Image (spheres, rainbow, N blue to C red):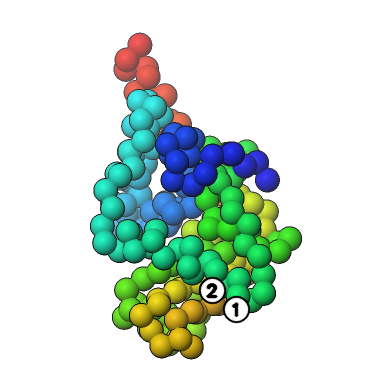
Amino acid sequence: MIVSPHPQGSPEWLAARVGLVTASRVSDIIATTKTGGSASRAGYLGELVAEILTGVSAESQFMNDDMRRGVELEPAARFAYEVETNRVVEPVGLVLHPTMKAAASPDGLVDPDGLIEIKCPRTHVHIGYLEAGKPPSKYLAQMEWQCICTGRRWVDFVSFDPKMPERLQLFIVRYEPTQEKLRALENEVRAFLEEVDVKVANLKRIAA
């Protein structure tokens, strides 16, 4: 793995992500409508082009209540996972894709071939995860991209809510994407980055 040494959330970590496709935004790349690419895909393409040309992150530093709760509860969720599974979670910073302008920031490394992805959602959302008993589809692309960048084989999706009764506070389910899924996603991101490069080159020609 090619790992940036900066802790997640630090100014250096944010700077290292400028101009890179990140795991949390991969779902925007593959989002489509009946007529083709989605508005979220076009918007993300524009954001990356702007980052490359300006060197400034397009990410907002605004934190809503849900985001703030996630940051505050993540250490407790990680500890609960370690106790429940008898595994040690190793922190990791930004993991760079070996060949593309892309990266991922998993919530931790587990065993020789695993990762952990932690969510601390509102109680009704956590209950939905418990009832479904499977990884939420909205996070599959994020976890797949984490596997691609790290070379790891599986991700334990973790949902944690300390408001729930003790036996219902922690939900863990493993996701092991197929190689076919990973190859398909990697091809999608590669094509997206080619579009980014074309747009950047065109704008540079205008400025010349």
CA neighbours of label 1 inside 10 A, class few (<14), some (14 to 19), many (20+): few
Which residue corresponds to mark 2?
A: 80
Which residue corresponds to mark 1?
A: 84
Question: At 67% from the left edge and 54% from the top edge, which residue is drawn?
Answer: 151
Is residue 165 in sight in this rendering?
A: yes
User: Is 188 placed left or right of 40 in the picture?
Assistant: right
Relative vertical location of residue 46 with respect to residue 203 in this rendering, above or below = below
Locate residue 184, reporting x and y percent.
Answer: 57, 57
Question: At 44% from the left edge and 81% from the top edge, which residue is drawn?
Answer: 169
State the residue lying farthest toward the top: 208
Q: Regarding mark 2 in the picture, which secondary structure is present there?
A: helix
Query: Residue 2 is drawn in which quadrant?
Result: top right
Q: CA distance from mark 1 to mark 2?
A: 6 Å
Is residue 180 in sight in this rendering?
A: no
Locate residue 56, reporting x and y percent.
Answer: 36, 30
Query: Residue 14 is drawn in which quadrant?
Result: top left
Mark 1 and mark 2 residues within 8 Å of each other at the beta carbon? yes
Q: Of 93 and 174, which appears nearest the observer?
A: 93
**Amino acid type shown at disc 1:** Glu
